Image (spheres, coloured by chain):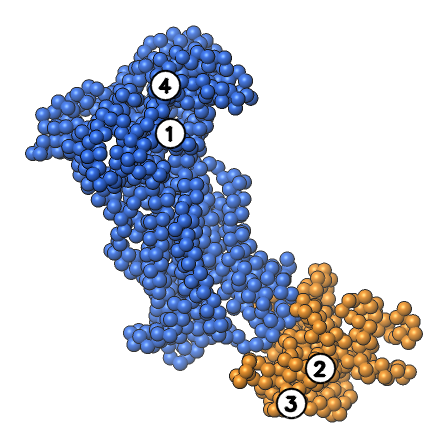
Chain colours: A orange, B blue
Amino acid sequence: MLRSGPLGELSTRAARLVEQHAFDPLVSIRSLTVRFGLFSGTKLPGSWPRCIVLSMHVLEAVDLHKTYGDGAGGVQALAGVSLTLSAGELVAVVGPSGCGKSTLLHLCGAMDRPTSGRVHVGGVTLADLDDEALTQLRRERVGFVFQFFNLLPTLTLQENIELPLLLAGVEATESERRARASAERVGIEHRRDHHPGAVSGGELQRAAVARALVHEPALVIADEPTGNLDSENGRLVLTLLTELTRQTGVAMLLATHDQAIAAAADRVVRMRDGLEARDTDVTIFGAVAPSS
Amino acid sequence: MILFRRFIGRALWRDPVRTAVTVAGLTLGVAVVLAIRLANTGSVRGFERALELVAGRTSLELVGAGVGVAEPALAELGWLREHGRVSPVIDRTALVLTPDGTEWPVRVLGVDILRDQPFRDYRLLQITEDNLDDVRPQDFLELLVDPGSLILTEQFASRHGLTLGGPARLVVGDVVHEMSVRGLLRDEGPARVVDGQLALVDIATAQWLFARIGWVDRVELQLFEPEAIDEIEAKVSARLPEGVQVQRPAQRGRQVEKMLAAFHFNLNALSYIALIVGVFLVYNTVAVSVIARRREIGTLRALGATRGRVLRLFLGEAAALALVGAGLGAPLGWLLAQGAVRLTSTTVNTLYVTSAATVPSLGLADLLLALGVTVPLALLAAAQPAAEAAAVPPIDAVRQIDPSAQARRASRRPQVVAAVAFAVAAWCSTRPPVDGLPLFGLAAALAVVLGAAMLVPALLSWLQRVGRAPLARWLGVEGLLAHANLSAAVSRLAVSVAALVVSLAMLAAIAIMIGSFRETVAYWVGQTLQADLFVAVGDRAPVGAPLTISADTEAQLASHPQVRAIDPFRNVDLPYGPDGDLIILGAGDFQVLLDYGGLLFKAPADARTAMRAAVDADAVVVSEVFANKHGVSAGEWISLDTPGGRRSFKVAAVYYDYSSDRGLVVMDRRTFTRHYGALRPTGMTLYLDPDADPDGVRDELLAAAGPDTRLFIQTNATLRQEVLRIFDATFAITYALEAIAIVVAIMGVAATLLTLVLERRHELAMLRLVGAGRRQIRRMVIIEATLLGALSQGLGLVVGFVLSLILIYVINVQSFGWTIQFHLPVGFLAQSTLLVAATTGLAGLYPAAVAMRTSGGDRER
């Protein structure tokens, strides 16, 4: 039924996505429309109704507040932040240490719950989900890249990359194949059998990027992905992230101190000491070429 | 499974020392539990096996009241032939002197061969020098008509160089009989009893050998219709004359099993201490793993692992450790059982039964038991840390984690649990035993142990608060650093220290209990053993037919000019009460006891007067154990089976006795003879003239008895030493079990320290950078280890004191029924305190060496 009408005109990739997710209980018709948003950052057919694309956000955060601790001793980390993110879009959150960047990312990545405000990922309201459903959402819709890589030391890089697939119950040979492909994509195929303790920081973060994308999430949360790397490796990882965002159409929310990284983003959200955010969605929009 | 292998399996592999220690702890725990179980089973099975072999096809047996069945009663039992074949039996123990100069106990079976043949599968291998197969009963009869005939097993004869037709010297009591070997039995049926240590004689010969003319030990009945045994047993029971009971042969095995139940139960309970310590180590491993891998768990959760999955991963870790521990522990347990049998058989043979205990082979049931106990216990132990892991939020993947803050958060709850546990312990201590077993007492001990474990975090927090200044002052910068390190790791250390506290508390409690018991026994021996010389025949044979002193010997002893008085005593085993518990019925000369002896009476106040009234009267004195077990007090009446039927006896007095936990009922010798017949005494106490030299008299008596005498004469001093030697042998296994538990616990502390050292390697490297020498690093780690040992011992002593009160006033009274006077073995406790501090310090050497190595060459990022 969904294939009729304008959907029938979609590219092969979009059709496959519809096929994959039409009967996924988590993916409502709304989130299907979000998937169409994949094309908002790439070349859209001229005839594509813009109104559909514009209304389809992978991530929608509304008036987020987060306070750690209770009463007078409580620390307010976020004081009313709103944010939207569409498919194929790379949004950088910048600001000094302690301004709430990471908190915002954690709330958007369903790793934590806000004190007030709402987060929708793929059209699903996170507040409506119990822990089990949130876990499933993270497993299927979200990928994470952490500042300290967070690769499990007992697993090889290949096994670390496989992890989201294994957790999702993908068969071992299939997950191995996809993880290998993912490792090749980020250029660490020669390090696949190494443990995290035996490779460089840049390679670790590449593996982390591969892990974040291996299960084809809609949203990737990258918290200071270059913060623990030297400038050369930082640049390489940044390039990788921007390229992959373009190629896969994933929506990427990235926190950073680095103005150069911010410059590579589609949009920049600047956060200040007062923990308020101003969505500067007019800046640098569409200015970045994918593989420049 | 893939995730489990990668996330848990590899982590265990990468921390080999901790994993090995945990597995070793569990292995030892399982091994000890299984070893004690196998040894216990072995000691009962040894007896039961012999019983089965000798019983053959016997369906029912008629027994008299402790002393067998009188022949006149047999004449009235002709009607038994309506139900089956009947065979009277004498079943005794004697020694065979072999040509090589050694002596071996043999079971002597005196049977009426014509009647007995269908009962047992014995077949003669040889009957004369000529090999004759298929010997007819008549040949057997001819052979046995000669009162000097003896048939041995082929196995025994060939092993000891005894030949067919050759002489054999049979020692019965203190008399040596010259016999000749007239036949050899094939290695089948009863001949297989205890390595072939069986001798067959005609029943008349047996009666003569064992001074049992006019009596048989039991009458066996082989039913024509074995399937109707219940009905026939009831019929026979109804028609039997007074003083004769019918029972199944297995009943004797059950009696022995029941008699050993309390002893075995306590050993079993004790064996579980090592397993509990092992399980503590599982908790420790999983808890440390959860704390140390919190960020990884957070990452897993962020990547989509559900709480249930995380829970299963860590429960799986505990189960895997338990499986390996049980798998290794089972065969080790079998090996340990061999040693345990040697240790416990001293006790069993000294105090309970003579049997050849052999360790049964390891069966599927034992393996299942090992798994069935270990895996659930390990899962239970891991439940809390696994639940904690499952509760780790995904945000912990990126959050800065402060373990000491977690410890502070959780610091109140254990104290509440401790308070509840102590309250439960107090309540359980007041509950009566269940089916004769101190289940509530053990529950009280367990609750105290749990409460103590829960106090450990508070103890470590106390060290954190008050330890800094004194440690810095006394031990310098290393003391200060050790304090800082321990303070930062309270939550990780709590469990391994708790395991050590529990083991040390048990050691202290057991030491106090045994010390108190020993003092009590020493005092009792001092008061009770007043005679100058004690005469017995051969080794003690506590159950079954005892070895007796012949009339000639008695006359010879009495004729010594310096012997003032003789108290010949005789013990028989008598089933008592509704459950047929085997008690000891003793006969002594009350008048001599009153004039010379020193029984310690518990009740009534004028016990000596009451005992005087019991001379030659239907009255008895009973041991405290008997009074407690059967709820009897002085002045009441008890019923005892006698060959003449059930008779009532007044309990004249209750006296303290620690020689047996079966309970003793003692009557005046004249009363005994009136009811049970004249039995030769099994021992004698001799009271000498005041100026006599006991050693001199002893030597004279032995010289008069001749070089081949079987008499054992001990002076008062040597017997007291012997009593305490037996006491110490009895508790040897207790200390062995406890030592294993402590070794496991100390290994746990060392493993925890090692983990801490490995986790702190950056910090240690930093210390080296700012100028700390290798020796200072080593000293710091050793101070940490010693501090933990000393703290554990401190709390262990306090908890041990409380536990010892439960052991002495609840568990012992309920298990064995005797009063123990409390006594604190200060010397032992002081020594053990120093030893534990030193041992834990030594256990810190390896982590210290690793610390020195690590801090010297840290190349890790």
> Which residue is depicted at the point 38% across and 79% down?
B771
Name the element at disc 2: strand
Q: Position of residue B323 (x, y in %)?
A: 54, 51
Q: Are marks 4 and 2 on the same chain?
A: no
Which image quadrant for residue B265? top left
**Residue carrying label 2:** A61
- Which badge, 1 or 4, comes first in the chain's sequence? 4
Residue extending farthest to the right is A5
Mark 4 secondary-structure assignment: strand
Residue tagged 1: B575
Pointer 4: what residue?
B69
Image disc number at residue A276: 3
* Tag 4 subunit: B
- Tell me residue A170's x, y (percent): 72, 62
Asked whether the beta carbons under mark 4 and mark 2 sit within 8 Å of each other, the answer is: no
- Crowd tier of the residue under label 3, counting other residues whose Cα lies within 10 Å: few below 14, some 14–19, many 20 or above: some
The three-letter code of the residue at mark 3 reads Glu
In this view, B406 is above or below B770: above
Give, as a three-letter code, the residue at label 1.
Pro
The alpha-carbon separation of the residues under discs 3 and 1 comes to: 90 Å
Q: CA distance from mark 1 to mark 4?
A: 15 Å
Amino acid type of disc 4? Answer: Val
Q: Say what amino acid the circle numbered 2 marks.
A: Ala
Q: Distance between the Cα atoms at labels 4 and 3?
A: 104 Å
Q: Mark 3 near mark 1, Cβ–Cβ under 8 Å?
A: no
Q: Which residue is nearer to you in this view: A272 or A94?
A: A272
At horizontal 38% and vertical 41% (from top left) the residue drawn is B263
Circle 1: element type: strand
